[in-house]
């Protein structure tokens, strides 16, 4: 676990350049999380959603950025509905957003009904057994508690298939024991605006809604929110876009960057032709090269797949205004970078290297690593010292 957190309650353009901010001597890497940008992203998504409500998806510790801080900032901005994956996450949201509507995407864990009811949580029911169990619990309690029903429109993961909907319609007794507060499905290719499956899923969702004429409806994730009003229904559920990630492929990203990851230089040395750098000796310089070793690695959440020479696809980070690139393998705790073109007074022990931020974004990194922003953000380790930038009073 991280030893300390800091919340800066005023706008700061660059925390590491703000002399009034004292960083702990033990901090080897800093993750700056800009709550101002987070709120601006939610406000933009809320505007795009039009008349639909804009919820916040805060599962996986708010995509690795800190559930309490993120949910609190969104709640203060006006977000009233949250989605988590687990009961434990939902209970944490409840502790800081007492009046919020909170849905648990895992659904109803068998025998755990009281854990939902005790915190006024709403399970997202994805099967007939879950529906029957929730109905029985509500019936025994004598209270019609709310829940969402998840219908499958083609993803074949969670959700009621069409055959189960027909079965449910033939015996609607279970539905009479609880309130169906939301009917939802999940788009599986919404990051591709041109994909024909979006339209097919939309049509399938309309068919499913015929079984629930009085319930609110939700289909759109981050990508779906940008597909237009036809996909918005009553509520949209953005996740990655809140945190500054790209929601639609091959289009400019309209969201503000929320995170910046910076690591200290531990040592600088000169290596010569014939020398090797790092595990496996995968990097061998062809000329005298200054190498800086920085205190960040895959145990901090940085991707090992970014090992090696990605020079042809741009820099991997910056020291001041000077771009730098990784050489050798990313290891558990360390990264080695070529600082030959950086002035020696900047590339020195104790200096900071920005390895993710506005100039090299989370999507830039994951494009090079062959993965997605969701993975990188959710992997960020709690051993990285976190600073929350908040321009609004707490």
Image (cartoon, helix red, strand yellow):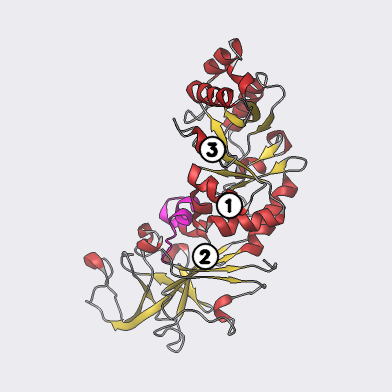
**Closer-to-camera residue (172/139):** 139
Residues under labels 3 and 1: Cα distance? 14 Å
The number of numbered discs placed on residues in the rendered structure image is 3
Q: Is label 2 or label 3 in front?
A: 3
Q: Is label 2 or label 1 in front?
A: 1
Q: Which mark is residue 273?
A: none
Residue position marked by numbered label 2 in the rendering: 360
Region rendered in magenta: 366-383
Q: Earlier in the sequence, mark 2 or mark 1?
A: 1
**Closer-to-camera residue (237/372):** 237
Q: Quadrant of the N terminus?
A: bottom left
Q: Is residue 105 visible?
A: no
* For residue 153, above or below residue 273: above
Whether residue 111 appears in magenta in the rendering, the answer is no
Residue position marked by numbered label 3 in the rendering: 116
Residue 11 placement (x, y as % from top left): 67, 72
* For residue 315, above or below residue 234: below
Q: Quadrant of the C terminus?
A: bottom right
Residue position marked by numbered label 1 in the rendering: 95
Residue 180 placement (x, y as % from top left): 64, 27
Q: Is residue 325 visible?
A: yes
Residue 330 shown left or right of residue 274 in the figure = right
Query: Mark 1 falls on what kind of element?
Result: helix
Q: Earlier in the sequence, mark 2 or mark 3?
A: 3
Q: Main secondary structure of the magenta part?
A: helix
Query: Mark 2 falls on what kind of element?
Result: loop
User: Quarter-wise, where is residue 29 in the image?
Assistant: bottom left
């Amino acid at each position: 676990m991280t030893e300390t957190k800091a919340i800066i309650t005023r706008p700061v353009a660059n925390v590491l350049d703000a002399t009034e901010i004292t960083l702990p001597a033990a901090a080897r890497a800093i993750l700056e999380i800009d709550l101002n940008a987070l709120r601006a992203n939610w406000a933009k998504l809320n505007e795009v959603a039009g008349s639909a409500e804009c919820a916040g998806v805060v599962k996986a510790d708010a995509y690795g950025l800190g559930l309490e801080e993120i949910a609190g900032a969104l709640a203060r901005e006006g977000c009233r509905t949250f989605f988590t994956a687990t009961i434990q996450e939902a209970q944490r949201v409840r502790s800081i957003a007492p009046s919020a509507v909170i849905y648990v995407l895992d659904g109803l864990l068998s025998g755990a009904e009281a854990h939902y009811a005790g915190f006024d949580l709403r399970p997202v029911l994805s099967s007939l057994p879950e529906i029957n169990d929730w109905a029985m619990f509500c019936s025994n309690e004598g209270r019609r508690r709310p829940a969402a029903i998840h219908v499958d429109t083609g993803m074949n993961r969670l959700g009621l298939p069409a055959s189960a909907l027909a079965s449910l319609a033939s015996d609607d007794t279970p539905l009479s024991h609880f309130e169906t507060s939301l009917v939802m499905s999940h788009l599986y290719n919404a990051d591709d605006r041109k994909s024909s499956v979006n339209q097919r899923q939309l049509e399938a969702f309309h068919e499913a809604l015929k079984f629930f004429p009085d319930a609110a409806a939700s289909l759109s994730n981050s990508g779906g929110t940008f597909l237009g009003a036809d996909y918005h229904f009553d509520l949209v559920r953005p996740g990655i876009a809140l945190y500054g990630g790209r929601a639609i492929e091959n289009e400019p990203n309209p969201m503000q960057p929320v995170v910046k990851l910076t690591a200290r230089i531990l040592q600088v040395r000169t290596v010569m032709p014939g020398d090797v750098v790092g595990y496996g000796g995968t990097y061998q310089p062809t000329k005298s090269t200054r190498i800086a070793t920085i205190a960040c690695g895959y145990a901090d959440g940085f991707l090992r797949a970014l090992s090696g020479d990605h020079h042809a696809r741009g820099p991997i980070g910056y020291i001041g205004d000077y771009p730098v690139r990784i050489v050798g393998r990313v290891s558990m705790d360390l990264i080695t970078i070529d600082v030959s073109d950086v002035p020696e007074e900047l590339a020195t022990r104790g200096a900071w290297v920005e390895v993710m931020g506005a100039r090299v974004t989370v999507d830039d990194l994951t494009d090079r690593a062959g993965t997605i922003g969701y993975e990188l953000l959710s992997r960020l380790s709690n051993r990285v010292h976190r600073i929350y930038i908040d321009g609004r009073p707490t």
